[in-house]
Image: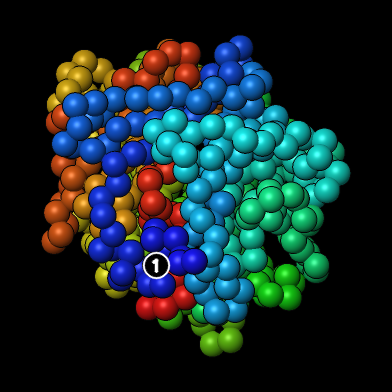
Amino acid sequence: MKPDPSFYPSPRMAMKAAPETLAYVAAFDPGRKVPDAIAVVDVDPRSKTYSKIINTVSMPNAGDELHHFGWNACSSCLCPNAPHPHSERRYLVVPGLRSSRIHILDTKPNPKKPKIVRVIEPNEVAERAGYTRPHTVHCGPEGIYVAALGNAEGKAPGGIFLMDHQTFDIRGQWEVERGPQQLAYDAWWHLGYDTLVTSEWGTPDMFENGLVPEILLGAKYGRRLHFWDLHKRKHLQTIDFGEEYQLVFELRPAHDPTKAYGFVNCVVSLKDLSSSIWVWHRDGNKWAVTKVIDIPAEPADAEKLPPVLKGFGAVPPLVTDIDLSMDDRFLYVACWGTGDLHQYDVSDPFKPKLAGKVRIGGIVAQAGHPAHKGPLSGGPQMVEISRDGKRIYFTNSLYGAIDPQFYPDGIEGWMVKLDARPEGGIAFDPKFFVKWPAPHRPHQVRLEGGDCSSDSYCYP
């Protein structure tokens, strides 16, 4: 028995992996009439079907709202504190954010044609975990960690539950001592520091029918980070960003396990509609945060703005996703509102430098693509980076009920790819533009063999 060849003890070694040839993409029907699907996209430039959807795996029910998903096992299985070296990166764990149903897809017999091998129904999730609305899936040292946004009744507190990475049985709630944490969103960790980090959005009733202006302007959405003892499963510290900052979302810790810092995005400032990027880091024997990037809103003609923004006369950047390259050098920042995708050199995480920028879609800009000259809706949303850092993929839909609030004329789905230069700088691959077949819209991308937001490592 040998470890899965896609497992690597260090991010440095993972960067030397062979290029991916397939991407798996979650696609959902915002009308909830047609079953959602996992699409398989050919990303091998040598292939005749490059930049095409070559297979679609439909879910057995309609209305799941596939959102984020992940692998059953990854490089963390090589960690000495909880080793499972003979596990396989074989199954995709695909939750429905609206339905709370979890689908297990086997990619091993034919990676181009995954098959659904198990469906875990919502009542089993609620009964065994005490949670609903599973959101983030991460393969960890002891199993599969799933961050969920609601409790069994769909209220607070949200939290984390564990699944077995081979049988997919739900083991139960992760937290032993929750402390003050109530809202949930993303979860990730610093394995070398026995620390888990969680962020906040809201409970299901706060977002399932769209963002609620009264909640947003009342600063009642998530604005905190929580730090936990990973092995004792105990809450240690809360950092409140302050009432101005709403929707503290995606966690991207340094891949180097000897580095105790990471990046998180704040979607919107109530003061000026800007977005911001923050670094969490050690400060003595505590954790602290420092704001390192501000991205301002852009003035715009009110006539061109959706109703939710007309009174502000500006397009907010709406940074809804970020991703960090495997060498911890480049941070990619998706501005879903303006249509920009920024590349920052974060070699010094406290002094980011803008290294590259492209624009596509956008609320007002509606910028095109080399392979699609007309106006495009949506904007850079879910971002994924190849292990070697040379290719960046992203899609354009955020969430079924929120898309029409900012794009009232509708979103036509697309997926694109950027090529990155080693010294910095990004450009569209003119041959890669996937026009998504309606009624589906694409969301998260996972890459064959792992990517920059799927694995964690125990050696530098």
In which quarter of the view is residue 202 placed? top right
Residue 74 x %, y %: 49, 59
Q: Nearer the viewer, residue 44 or 430?
A: 44
Residue 451 x %, y %: 38, 53
Numbered marks: total: 1
Q: Quadrant of the C terminus?
A: bottom left
295 displayed left or right of 4:
left
Give the residue displayed 49% in from the left and 53% down from the top: 89
Give the residue displayed 40% in from the left and 24% down from the top: 55
Residue 272 x %, y %: 44, 44
Q: Nearer the viewer, residue 398 or 279?
A: 398
In which quarter of the view is residue 402 placed? top right
Relative to 335, does residue 325 appear above or below in the rendering?
below
Q: Residue furthest front?
A: 1
Relative to 335, does residue 449 appear above or below in the rendering?
below
* Circle 1: residue type: Tyr
In which quarter of the view is residue 81 placed? bottom right
Q: Secondary structure at mark 1?
A: loop
Q: Nearer the viewer, residue 1 or 293?
A: 1
426 displayed left or right of 127:
left
Residue 54 x %, y %: 35, 25
Q: Quick check: can you spot residue 240?
A: no
2 displayed left or right of 392:
right
250 displayed left or right of 394:
right
The residue carrying pointer 1 sits among few (fewer than 14), some (14 to 19) or many (20 or more) residues within 10 Å by Cα, namely: many
- The residue wearing badge 1 is 8
Give the residue displayed 54% in from the left and 45% down from the top: 91
